[in-house]
Amino acid sequence: MKRTHGILGLGILLALFLGMMALMRVTAANVKTLSGGQGIIDLTFGISPERIRSALSGYGKKAAAFYQWVFLSVDMVYAFAYCTFYRCTIKSLLERLGAGDRSSVILPLLPVVGMTADLLENTVMFILLSSSTATALCGVFTVLNIIKFVFVYSSLAIVVGGALCLIKKRLS
């Protein structure tokens, strides 16, 4: 069986993913500190447009600027890190489990869809922090947020499920 992703490569991708996650958490904590307790909006699943507008009004200039320029920059890189890790891991697990061609093509695309929604969500947030809290943009943000969470957590579930199936296969 041809293996395109070695364990070492996946380990390096995991380390990069976890490092970016840690950096993202640090910058999120800084936003919370600078805003006097207001958390990061895009870390809340399915946040309503009304709650987005309310949260945006809770950021002062310093917190909004840090969120916009630092947190969102880190989150953009984080999106590429988790997408790459999940995509390569799913592809590798499917190869090792002997999955069919269709699932080997479709399932590795799930994290790409999640990342794309995340990057678009970050772009909308950047605009919201820059100018206005237009209802339409808050609604777009909510939809992108839901798409991101569904596809990213689906990717995580496939990685965990695939790893468990591989362990079961090896123990049999």
Image (spheres, rainbow, N blue to C red):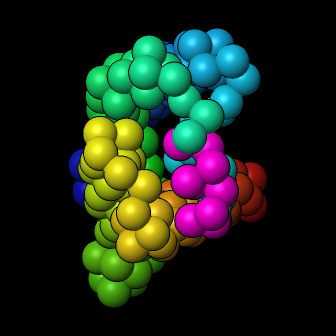
Q: Is residue 88 left or right of residue 39?
A: left
Determine the residue positioned at 44% across, 15% down.
62
**In terms of depth relative to the viewer, which is nearer, 83 or 9?**
83
The number of numbered badges drawn on the structure is 0
Most common SS among magenta residues: helix
Would you say residue 94 is visible in this rendering?
no
Residue 136: image quadrant is: bottom left
Q: Is residue 45 left or right of residue 95?
A: right
- Name the spot of residue 163 as percent of width and height, x first: 62, 53
- Name the spot of residue 82 as percent of width and height, x first: 42, 42
- Name the spot of residue 89 as percent of width and height, x first: 43, 49
Q: Quadrant of the N terminus?
A: bottom left
Q: Which residues are magenta?
A: 48-56
**In terms of depth relative to the viewer, which is nearer, 135 or 6?**
135
Q: Quadrant of the C terminus?
A: bottom right
Determine the residue positioned at 61% across, 44% down.
55
Would you say residue 168 is visible in this rendering?
yes
**In terms of depth relative to the viewer, which is nearer, 114 or 66?**
66
Residue 140: image quadrant is: bottom left
- Name the spot of residue 22 as percent of width and height, x first: 55, 19
Image height check: is 82 above or below 148?
A: above
Let me know if residue 49 is in the magenta part: yes
Determine the residue positioned at 37% across, 22% down.
65
**In terms of depth relative to the viewer, which is nearer, 80 or 99?**
80
Let me know if residue 23 is in the magenta part: no
